[in-house]
Amino acid sequence: MTKPLLRPRCGWCGRELPQQGGAGRRRIYCKQGCRQQAHIARKLAASHGLGPDELIISRRDLEELQGHLYGLQAALEDVEDDLEQARRSGREPDYREAFEWLRASAVPLRSFWVEPKGT
């Protein structure tokens, strides 16, 4: 199976960047507003002594995110075990049920994706 090609995403908001043709530098941001916000964030981070790959997140948000990720990891392990048991017993694995379980376990992570304004 081949991996799907990942389209480049905006360095600020995460939207897919439009396909670019021709010569020139590749786009990093989807629009000027994102470029400006990234600039402000870099200046603010530098004033607090943070590097370009560091960020500040509240302990509560970090713990909540870790909890959701743990739940998704546990669901993935459950699905792997269930599918393997079905194969060993000669039954047809229920992929639909496995998908629904993983999907339901991933839904809480949506709360951490903040949709950019104006979309």
Image (cartoon, rainbow, N blue to C red):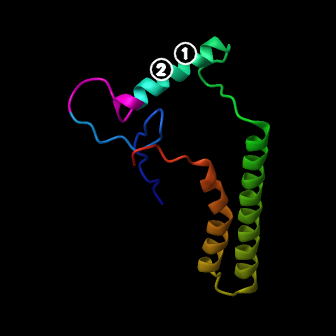
The kind of secondary structure the magenta stretch mainly shows is loop
Task: Examine the rendering and report whether any part of residue 33 can be seen.
Answer: yes
Q: Nearer the viewer, residue 19 or 32?
A: 32
Q: Residue at x 63, y 18 (%)?
A: 51
Question: Where residue 84 sits: x, y (%)?
Answer: 73, 74
Q: Quadrant of residue 28?
A: top left
Q: Callout 2, which amino acid? A: His
Q: Callout 1, which amino acid? A: Lys
105 in relation to 2, above or below = below
The magenta-colored residue range is: 22-33
Q: Quadrant of residue 21?
A: top left
User: Outermost residue, front direction?
Assistant: 118
Residue behind mark 2: 39
Q: Quadrant of residue 23?
A: top left
Residue behind mark 1: 43
Q: Residue at x 35, y 28 (%)?
A: 32
